[in-house]
Image (cartoon, rainbow, N blue to C red):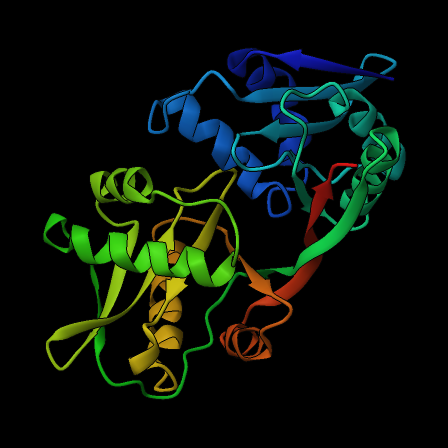
Amino acid sequence: MRCLDEDLATFAATTGTWLRREPVLHNVLLTLVADRLSGDVPLSGAERFVRVVDGGATVGAVVHTPPHGPLLGAVSTTVAQALADHFVRATPPLVEVNGPVPAVAEFAQRYADRVAGSAVPGTAQRILSLDAVRPPVVVAGRARPATPADRDLLIDWAAAYARETVPGGPPVDPRGQIDARLWHGDLLWLWVEAGGPVAMAWLSRPVAGVVRVSGVYTPPRWRGRGFASGCVAHVSRHALEAGATRCTLYTDLANPTSNKIYQALGYRPVSDAAQWRLIPA
C-alpha cells in the first residue's frame, strides 16, 4: 500500500471514480477539488492531494487545505493508518484531522502515537441526505437569492456562524466564499420577514448529482420562529428542481434542535463524521 502526493489535475483524474462511488460521503472532497479546478478557489500552494493505492487500485484519498486539517475519504482503518504514517512528516505538524467515523479516529490515534502527542475528540457530526422535501409548517416570510448588496451582511453572519460552530478555531475570513457564491447567482439565500433578512443558507454547486446545504444561520434575536427551517426547505427544493439528485448537510450531534429540524424536512442519516484535535507532546 502506497500514499502518493499528486498535483490537483492528476489527483482529480485518478481519484474521481473512487470518490464518486460515495457521492454523499465524499461531497466535500469532490467540492474542494472542483472549486480549485474551476479557479473559483485559487490554489495557495500549501494544499496536499494524497491518493492511496494498493495493487494498482485506488483505495483512499485525502485533501489537506491548511489552515484546516486533512479531510479523509471514507477509507478503511488500515488505509487510515497508512495515511497517518504518511502525514507524520507534515510541516508544520497537524493540529486536527476530519473525516468519516471510524477512519478519522484511527488516523488521529495513529498519528498521535507516531509523534508522541495526543489525540482528543472534537466536534461530532452526522451527515444527512434528502431526495424529497417535506415542507415545514407555515413559516412567516419568504426566501430570496442574496445579491451583492447583501455582501457585508453575509460576511458578518458567516463570521458569526464560524465562531459558533467552531469555537476556539482559527480565524475565518469568509469573503472569498461569499464572493464566489454571489458570482454564481443562486448559491446564497436569505429568508426575509417584515422586509428584512432574518436567516441564511448556502448551497454548493452540484458535484456527482449532490448539492450540499451549509452556512445555515439565524442571528440569536430571530431564533425559534422557524426561519432556518423555511430557508433550508426552500434551498433544498430549489436544488432538486434545478437537477440535483440529492441534497446533503452536516449537523452537530451536540445540537439536538438542528438535527430534529432537518429530519422533519426529510433529511435522513447517512453516516457520522468527526473532527479530532491533535496535540503535540
In this rendering, position of residue 107 left or right of residue 30: right
Does 136 sit above or below residue 162? Answer: below
Numbered disc total = 0
Which quadrant is home to the N terminus? top right
Residue 105 shows in the view: yes
Q: Where residue 229 sits: x, y (%)?
A: 40, 76
- Where residue 88 sits, quadrant-wise, is top right
Q: Nearer the viewer, residue 262 or 256?
A: 256
Q: Estimate the x, y position of residue 248 in percent, counting from the top left.
A: 53, 55
Q: Hey, which residue is sitting farthest front in the picture?
A: 281
Quarter location, residue 125 = bottom right
Q: Nearer the viewer, residue 161 or 24?
A: 161
At 46% from the left edge and 63% from the top edge, which residue is drawn? 164
110 or 140, which is in the foreground? 110
What residue lies at 47% left-to-right and 16% top-to-bottom?
45
Q: Residue 166's spot in the image, x, y percent?
A: 52, 56
Quadrant of the frame with the C terminus:
top right
Left or right: residue 108 versus residue 38 is right
In this rendering, the answer to whether 169 lies above or below 63 is below
In the figure, 19 relative to 43: above or below?
below
- Specify whether 274 is left or right of 209: right
Q: Using the image, determine if residue 222 lies above or below residue 155.
A: below
User: Does any portion of residue 215 appear in the rendered image?
Assistant: no
Front in this rendered view, residue 280 or 26 = 280
Q: Position of residue 217 (x, y in %)?
A: 37, 66
